[in-house]
Image (spheres, helix red, strand yellow):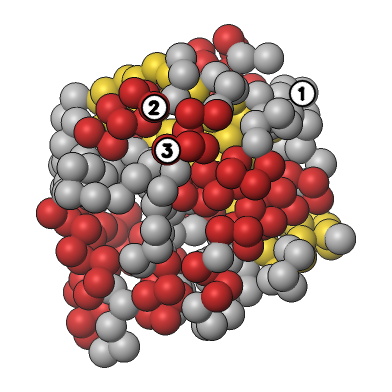
């Protein structure tokens, strides 16, 4: 069941975008905040899912850019993040069926028709949990954006050590680790106003939620091999969180997957090079049905 608010306006970093806010409730009772950026005449449905300790605001440049005028973009705050409910018990985050139910609920209650899923970083786990339980028959395409598809030393970079520090209850330690991860997420230094913006919504995530997200098994190869929907893997060459070998693994395991490596970009290519990212995603969307 969903509740729909009136149209609202997001104003941040000199950008404006209008959206309608929906509240949906997952099968396990978690209320999820969804944002529908549909514009007049916008086309097919696209669901964007953010990563660890982030929020829907990570997609600011997409929802206020050319993709939003061509496609119906929908974002949401994953459980424990942003404006969604933040239960602290570990089982809400460590059981794959809960993530599968969350994605399925958003798709159903936002009335998305055969959407393309675009998902970043930790959201690779979330989408693969969904696919493991539901398959991809109701999905038109998948865009892995520096997205997790396994978790071992061959694909994880040195900056992942900061994730553990971000789970500490000591506020000063927590803030410093979060700042370090944000600065490690791009190949070029972020402007200070963008750092402040990102730090604010990262700090909305309780340390206990972050701790519950870490160390979860990532045995997704069987699910990857079953994917038949078109797949695009976009990855920054300078990512020190999920190494470019993560995209190599995804493309080697998924039938007919295609990779685009962004030279000189880090963990957030959609933020560092939004024009290139939007162009490549737009071309992918136009070739999928």
The x and y percentages for residue 42 are 72, 26
The disc, 1 or 3, on the residue closer to the chain's N-terminal end is: 1
Whole-angstrom CA distance, mark 1 to mark 3, is 39 Å
Q: Residues within 10 Å of mark 3 (few under 14, many from 20)?
A: some
Question: As drawn, which residue projects farthest toward the top?
Answer: 287
In the rendered structure, the answer to whether residue 203 lies left or right of residue 176 reads right
What residue sits 66% from the left and 57% below the top? Answer: 102
Asked if the residue under mark 3 is in contact with the one under mark 2, i.e. CB atoms within 8 Å, the reply is: yes
Q: Residues within 10 Å of mark 1 (few under 14, many from 20)?
A: few
Between label 1 and label 3, give the one nearer the viewer. 3
| Nearer the observer, 14 or 210 | 210
Between label 1 and label 2, give the one nearer the viewer. 2
| Nearer the observer, 179 or 40 | 179
Whole-angstrom CA distance, mark 1 to mark 2, is 37 Å
Q: Is residue 280 above or below residue 15?
A: above
Asked if the residue under mark 2 is in contact with the one under mark 1, i.e. CB atoms within 8 Å, the reply is: no
Judging by the rendered image, the residue that carries numbered circle 2 is 253
What residue sits 74% from the left and 73% below the top? Answer: 29
Q: Secondary structure at mark 2?
A: helix
Judging by the rendered image, the residue that carries numbered circle 3 is 221
Whole-angstrom CA distance, mark 2 to mark 3, is 7 Å
Give residue 170's mark: none
Q: Residues within 10 Å of mark 2 (few under 14, many from 20)?
A: some
Question: As drawn, which residue projects farthest toward the bottom?
Answer: 170
- Residue 39 visible in the picture: no
Q: Secondary structure at mark 3?
A: helix
The disc, 2 or 3, on the residue closer to the chain's N-terminal end is: 3
- Residue 41 visible in the picture: yes
The x and y percentages for residue 147 are 38, 41
What residue sits 42% from the left and 38% below the top? Answer: 221
Give residue 41's mark: 1
């Amino acid at each position: 069941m969903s509740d729909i608010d009136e149209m609202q306006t997001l104003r941040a970093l000199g950008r404006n975008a209008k959206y309608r806010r929906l509240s949906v409730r997952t099968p396990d009772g978690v209320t999820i905040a969804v944002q529908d950026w549909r514009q007049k005449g916008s086309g097919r449905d696209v669901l964007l899912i953010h990563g660890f300790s982030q929020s829907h605001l990570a997609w600011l440049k997409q929802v206020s850019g050319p993709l939003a005028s061509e496609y119906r973009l929908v974002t949401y705050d994953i459980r424990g993040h942003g404006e969604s409910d933040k239960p602290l018990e570990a089982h809400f985050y460590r059981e794959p069926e809960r993530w599968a139910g969350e994605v399925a609920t958003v798709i159903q209650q936002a009335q998305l028709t055969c959407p393309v899923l675009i998902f970043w970083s930790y959201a690779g786990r979330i989408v693969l949990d969904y696919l493991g339980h539901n398959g991809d028959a109701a999905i038109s395409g998948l865009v892995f954006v520096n997205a997790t598809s396994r978790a071992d030393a061959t694909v994880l970079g040195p900056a992942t050590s900061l994730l553990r520090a971000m789970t500490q209850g000591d506020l000063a330690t927590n803030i410093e680790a979060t700042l370090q991860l944000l600065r490690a997420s791009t190949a070029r230094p972020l402007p200070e106003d963008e750092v402040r913006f990102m730090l604010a919504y990262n700090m909305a995530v309780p340390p206990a939620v972050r701790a519950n997200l870490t160390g979860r098994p990532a045995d997704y190869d069987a699910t990857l091999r079953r994917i038949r929907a078109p797949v695009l893997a976009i990855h920054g060459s300078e990512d020190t969180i999920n190494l470019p070998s993560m995209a190599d693994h995804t493309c080697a395991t998924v039938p007919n997957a295609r990779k685009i490596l962004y030279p000189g970009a880090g963990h957030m290519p959609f933020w560092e090079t939004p024009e290139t990212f939007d162009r490549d995603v737009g071309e992918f969307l136009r070739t999928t049905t």
